């Protein structure tokens, strides 16, 4: 499980120069590591990479010797897990669930009382039973971890026609819900389902061409910045 405050929003220019979003808090400190909900609240206020670039350029306080002008390129989210650096994809405002929840729980790491958690629990169980291609996509692309997948499999077993054990099934369901209360786990499953559906739409649209390519990362061509630098109080995000 990711520790608190280790997520950063990374910008990569078209020339390959990389830097992190840095924001100044009200006490004057500069931060570039944030809760995942905070980063999602920022990115999901935008429609695409270009809007995100314009917004974050106003929020960013660059390092003195930074060669990254934040005039083009793209973003991704970086974090550390078991001493390894990993990446997460950006969520924009078309992902309505994450857009809403990142605002409700902005600055937090869990969602213990949200009704969306048990809804997703039953949804992923249903996917396990009836949508094997989607379920395999979530497993293969690490949107669904092995332990949660094991719990889901055991729940399906204890509620199956061949062998039913309501007590054990309830235990597994409670464990599944407890896992999904972690915002990052909840978020990644939703992002995985969203990406799978988008990929299916792309494949359907390109079926007549006889070949389907994976969707590319949005990259913004050079733009001229407008507006003034935003202060911490203008941003309204919790650190």
Image (tube, rainbow, N blue to C red):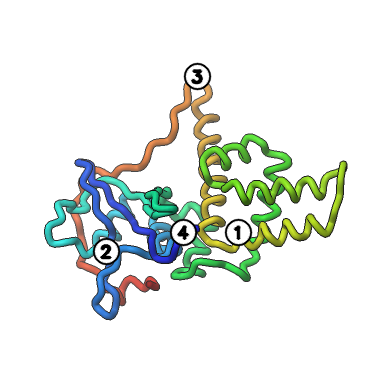
Q: Nearer the viewer, mark 4 or mark 2?
A: 4
Secondary structure beneath label 3 = loop
Mark with earlier residue (4, 1)? 4
Closest to the observer, 192 or 231? 192
Q: Nearer the viewer, mark 4 or mark 3?
A: 4
Mark with earlier residue (1, 2)? 2
Mark with earlier residue (4, 3)? 4
Mark with earlier residue (3, 1)? 1
Query: 41 left or right of 117?
Result: left
Closest to the observer, 54 or 159? 159
List the residue tagged with mark 1: 180
User: Furthest residue to the left?
Assistant: 65
Badge 1 density bin: few <14, some 14–19, many ≥20, Cα 10 Å: many
Q: Which mark is residue 69?
A: none
Q: Which mark is residue 2?
A: 4
Badge 2 density bin: few <14, some 14–19, many ≥20, Cα 10 Å: many
Q: Quadrant of the C terminus?
A: bottom left
Q: Nearer the viewer, mark 2 or mark 3?
A: 2
Q: Are marks 4 and 1 in contact (CB under 8 Å)?
A: no
Secondary structure beneath label 4 = loop
Q: Nearer the viewer, mark 3 or mark 1?
A: 1
User: Furthest residue to the bottom?
Assistant: 27
State the image coordinates of residue 138 (x, y, percent, origin top left): 57, 42
Mark with earlier residue (2, 3)? 2
Query: In whole angstroms, how far apart are the C-alphas of marks 4 and 2?
Result: 20 Å
Secondary structure beneath label 2 = loop
List the residue tagged with mark 3: 210
State the image coordinates of residue 123 (x, y, percent, origin top left): 68, 51
List the residue tagged with mark 2: 22
């Amino acid at each position: 499980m990711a520790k608190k405050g280790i997520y950063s929003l990374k910008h990569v220019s078209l020339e390959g120069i990389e830097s992190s979003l840095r924001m100044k808090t009200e006490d004057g400190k500069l931060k570039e590591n944030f809760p995942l909900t905070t980063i999602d609240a920022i990115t999901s206020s935008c429609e695409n990479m270009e809007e995100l670039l314009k917004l974050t350029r106003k929020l960013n306080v660059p390092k003195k010797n930074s060669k990254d002008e934040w005039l083009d390129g793209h973003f991704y989210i970086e974090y550390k897990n078991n001493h390894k650096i990993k990446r997460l994809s950006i969520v924009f405002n078309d992902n309505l669930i994450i857009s809403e929840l990142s605002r409700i729980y902005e600055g937090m790491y869990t969602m213990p009382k949200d009704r969306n958690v048990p809804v997703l629990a039953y949804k992923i169980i249903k996917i396990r039973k009836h949508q094997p291609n989607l379920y395999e996509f979530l497993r293969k692309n690490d949107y669904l971890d092995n332990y949660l997948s094991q719990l889901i499999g055991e729940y399906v077993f204890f509620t199956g026609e061949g062998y039913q054990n309501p007590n054990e099934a309830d235990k597994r369901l409670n464990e599944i819900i407890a896992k999904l209360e972690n915002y990052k786990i909840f978020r990644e499953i939703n992002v995985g389902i969203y990406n799978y559906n988008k990929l299916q739409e792309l494949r359907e649209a390109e079926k007549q061409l006889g070949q389907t390519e994976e969707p590319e990362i949005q990259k913004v061509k050079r733009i001229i910045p407008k507006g003034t630098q935003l202060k911490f109080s203008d941003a309204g995000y919790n650190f």
